[in-house]
Amino acid sequence: MSHKLTTQDVHVWYGSFHALKGVTLSVKPNTVTAFIGPSGCGKSTFLRLFNRMNDYIEGFHMGGEIIIDGRNIYGKRILVEELRKEVGMVFQKPNPFPKSIYDNVVYGLQIQGINDKHVLEEACETSLKQAALWNEVKDNLKKSALALSGGQQQRLCIARTLAVKPTMILMDEPASALDPISTAKIEELILELKSQYTIVIVTHNMQQAARISDRTAFFYLGELIEYDKTVNIFTNPKEEKTQSYITGRFG
């Protein structure tokens, strides 16, 4: 099975601060990979490399290679806008636009110049169904997205990401701002989506990583300490630091 994503000896600096130190790992297609570790350990920085979100941060520079679908995404010929269609992102706090539910979902397609009403309506319905939100909003698509609950807003943001047909979805603590019921819905959704997408998630919640991921990477102070099948990380870690973190001795 070929890899969807491979990173080779990745270093990141923000000015003189060395945020990531020589991270090498591979992610297989149609899996959920979780990044865990204490705050400030580099896991969100690493995640944001995959759709070049760190490019906007002052003083950012990186070394090493990141290969997605056989292409070095920091190569000279990469069009970042094209990359971001392939690699969607869902953030920690739901961030719907102050527009209708419908306009939120089709926004990315309209930016690409797709204006065919039939195509947009179909994409809206399909994406909302994939995000397990269609039945809750189908009669109110013209309603403002800001009127939805937090959990619904986050599923709407997932639908918006799915509408442009990515192959990979990055999620940066997608449930940390949500209540337990909404969190359970997001987790259920992630498990359903992995049959069609490769998903990489940063989470502070170790139980969440244990419940939904196939593989888990533990980061500490900018280094990848251990990366293995999730069951091994949580039941039989090889590294003492991993053991200390998952048993709550630090964090």
Image (cartoon, helix red, strand yellow):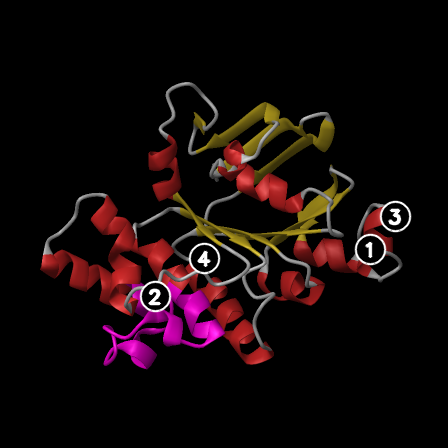
User: Residue 70 appears at what percent x and percent y?
Assistant: 43, 28
Magenta-tinted stretch: 127-156
Identify the amino acid type marked 3. Answer: Glu
First in sequence: mark 2 vs mark 1: 2
C-alpha distance separating marks 2 and 4: 11 Å
Image depth: mark 1 or mark 3 in front: 1
First in sequence: mark 2 vs mark 4: 2
Identify the amino acid type marked 2. Answer: Gln
Query: Height in image: 87 above or below 188?
Result: above
Question: Residue 9's quadrant in the figure?
Answer: top right
82 vs 149, left or right, is: left
As drawn, the residue found furthest toward the top would be 76
Q: Which residue is mark 4?
A: 194
Is 7 part of what is drawn in magenta? no
Identify the amino acid type marked 1. Answer: Tyr
Q: Which residue is mark 2?
A: 130
Do tag 2 and tag 1 residues touch (Cβ < 8 Å)?
A: no
Main SS of the magenta part reads helix
Q: Which residue is mark 3?
A: 240
Q: Which residue is mark 1?
A: 245
Question: SS at mark 1?
Answer: helix
Question: SS at mark 2?
Answer: helix
Instruction: Say which residue appears at 16% left-offset and 48% top-offset.
Output: 114
Instruction: Say which residue appears at 25% left-offset and 57% top-offset.
Output: 106
C-alpha distance separating marks 2 and 3: 40 Å
- Packing grade of label 3 (10 A; few <14, some 14-19, many >=20) is few
First in sequence: mark 1 vs mark 3: 3
Instruction: Say which residue appears at 52% left-offset and 76% top-offset.
Output: 182
